Image (cartoon, coloured by chain):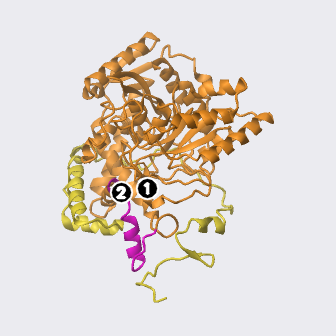
């Protein structure tokens, strides 16, 4: 059931508890492993409380809809593991701002979803608790790092979900699982209570089965937050109200080199998507965005550098796992050695990128490449309103296919990291399939023009 | 960018405060070498004159310089791996404690 359908059911007299029981039943005994925690008793108690709020006449825009939460977002009183052994038993003492806003809007916080450890990965296979499977084909990955949140919506367990997107971690799994996702502009949504991976890139983002569902969640979570100094002090235009506005007269740049780099079925689906936009009144133009070839390398120096700094806090002293050593330094080392292999790889790479003697040619140079890329986007947006490119070069790949090859895994992000580095809003929408495996189209917009993206997503859907 | 040699990897592991076994160390060295080699495009790009970008948000702002309530002691300590007498307990920084 979509979010829109859920709200209609509640308005028609259904109880949140009934809907919660149906949602729990839909998870049943499936083997997708989308959740790290699904606390039936707590969910049903919360459902009863929401029914009571509705009975008192409270206006609840989300009307008790079950919304799943990626397990790197703090939810008070609930374990927040980040898919890591280091936080396996850690219970969040407060709500993330986005979680707080969902509660206030009447969401039923459904379950905590699986992810690559500390959101580092593109397949959810880096979770310390095992991989999530793709709902369209359980022999394949759901994408990552927000694979659990994408699979939960793709399988129809919940009305919508939240993920986080650092280099494509909502867009790529949305493409692989055949659902919609919108990564807002950097600063549009508060990061307070999101366990930090790469602070200059991280954004909380919604998944939905429909564009309307994504817009409804976006409207609830977007907006300034005094607890996040990087959140933008800007009024938010309603995504829901923008829907139906059409795309007549918009200029969309088709990033041709990306289509040429993608697998043939992906390129063909994108060409069809471009035609749909054109039929709806869009003016198409081929764009060869400069410096795209630098994006993946820049990302895989900048994000690990920020991760190395952010993850220094996991030292076994203040929270989470502690593995005792003979002294403090040995305790740090013994504790931090429980990170998984990908997290260790990125921490070491990031440490290298920031170290004296290497920082100028690694981190600083990558940050110069970031400037080049931002300028290329700015230049492109002089002549177009949106960019269209594939979300990923391929459809979902088989479980285990890339776990031994980090470069092959990183390549799954090649089309999503550019918008992340530039802090731009970007979306993914299903636009076709290859043998039943979904293909996603990515739209990238100017800063804070999420509503333009939503209008175009609606035409693609 | 050069591949990582053993001495450099050892120093990075020490700085990052992580330890790995011999097999994992060799795999890590090879993986990092491949990743760094793949980044040659950055080394060769004509970007020397561009300023680095370290953040993309709008101008950062500060809150009023006034005290606000943080986590109370009980909530903070509830997450501590080890605590006693209302304090976090840490191993000795100078070697194993005699106590």
**Left or right of A457 on screen, residue A304:** left
Q: Residue furthest front?
A: A29
The chain containing the residue under callout 2 comes to: A
Percent of width and height locating residue A299:
34, 45
> In the figure, what tint was chain A given?
orange
Placement of A418 over or under A9, stated as above or below: below
Task: Say whether marks 1 and 2 touch (CB < 8 Å).
Answer: yes
Residue nearest the viewer, comparing A60 with A109: A109
Please give the residue where the numbered disc 1 appears in the rendered image.
Answer: A84
Both on one chain, marks 1 and 2? yes
Residues shaded magenta: A322-343
Res. A340 mark = 2
Horizontal side of A358 relative to B73 (left or right) equals left
Outermost residue toward the bottom in this view:
B98
Q: Is residue A446 visible?
A: no
Whole-percent x and y of residue A24?
57, 38
Q: What distance separates the C-alpha of mark 1 from that of mark 2?
A: 8 Å
Does the magenta portion include A399?
A: no
Secondary structure under badge 1?
A: loop
């Amino acid at each position: 059931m979509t979010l829109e359908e859920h709200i209609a059911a509640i308005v028609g007299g259904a109880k949140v508890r009934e809907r919660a029981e149906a949602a729990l039943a839909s998870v049943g005994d499936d083997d997708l492993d989308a959740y790290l925690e699904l606390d039936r008793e707590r969910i049903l108690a919360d459902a009863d409380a929401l029914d009571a709020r509705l009975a008192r006449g409270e206006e609840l825009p989300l009307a008790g809809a079950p919304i799943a939460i990626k397990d790197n977002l703090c939810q008070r009183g609930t374990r927040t593991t980040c898919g890591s052994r280091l936080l396996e038993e850690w219970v969040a003492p407060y709500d993330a701002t986005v979680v707080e806003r969902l509660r206030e809007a009447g969401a039923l916080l459904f379950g905590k979803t699986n992810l690559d450890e500390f959101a580092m990965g593109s397949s959810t296979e880096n979770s310390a608790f095992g991989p999530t499977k793709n709902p369209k084909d359980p022999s394949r990955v759901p994408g990552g790092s927000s694979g659990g949140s994408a699979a939960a919506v793709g399988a129809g367990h919940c009305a919508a979900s939240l993920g986080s997107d650092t280099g494509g971690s909502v867009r790529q799994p949305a493409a692989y699982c055949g659902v919609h996702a919108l990564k807002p502009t950097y600063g549009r949504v508060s990061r307070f209570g999101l366990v930090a991976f790469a602070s200059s890139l991280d954004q909380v983002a919604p998944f939905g089965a429909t564009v309307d569902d994504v817009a409804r969640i976006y409207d609830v979570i977007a907006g300034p937050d005094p607890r996040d100094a990087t959140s933008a002090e800007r009024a938010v235009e309603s995504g829901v109200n923008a829907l139906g506005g059409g795309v007549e007269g918009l200029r969309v740049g088709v990033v041709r080199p990306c289509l040429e780099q993608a697998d043939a079925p992906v390129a063909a689906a994108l060409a069809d998507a471009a035609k749909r936009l054109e039929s709806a009144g869009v003016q198409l133009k081929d764009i060869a965005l400069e410096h795209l070839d630098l994006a993946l390398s820049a990302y895989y120096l900048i994000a690990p550098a920020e991760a190395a700094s952010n993850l220094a806090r996991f030292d076994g002293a203040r929270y989470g796992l502690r593995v005792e050593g003979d002294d403090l330094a040995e305790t740090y080392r013994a504790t931090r050695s429980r990170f998984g292999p990908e997290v260790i790889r990125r921490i070491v790479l990031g440490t290298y990128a920031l170290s004296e003697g290497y920082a100028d040619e690694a981190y600083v140079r990558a940050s110069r490449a970031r400037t080049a890329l931002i300028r290329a986007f700015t230049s492109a947006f002089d002549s177009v309103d949106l960019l269209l490119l594939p979300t990923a070069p391929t459809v979902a790949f088989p479980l285990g296919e890339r776990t031994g090859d980090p470069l092959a895994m990183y390549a799954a992000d090649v089309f999503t990291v550019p918008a992340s580095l530039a802090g731009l809003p970007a979306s993914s929408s299903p636009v076709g399939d290859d043998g039943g495996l979904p293909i996603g189209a990515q739209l990238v917009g100017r800063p804070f023009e999420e509503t333009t993206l939503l209008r175009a997503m609606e035409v693609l859907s | 960018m050069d591949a990582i040699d053993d001495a450099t990897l050892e120093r990075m592991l020490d700085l990052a405060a992580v330890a790995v076994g011999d097999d994992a160390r060799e795999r890590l060295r090879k993986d990092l070498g491949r990743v760094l080699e793949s980044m040659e495009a950055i080394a060769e790009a004509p970007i020397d004159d561009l300023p680095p970008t370290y953040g993309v948000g709008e101008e950062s702002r500060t809150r009023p310089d006034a005290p606000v309530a943080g986590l109370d002691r009980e909530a903070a300590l509830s997450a501590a791996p080890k605590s006693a007498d209302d304090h976090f307990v840490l191993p000795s920084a100078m070697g194993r404690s005699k106590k």
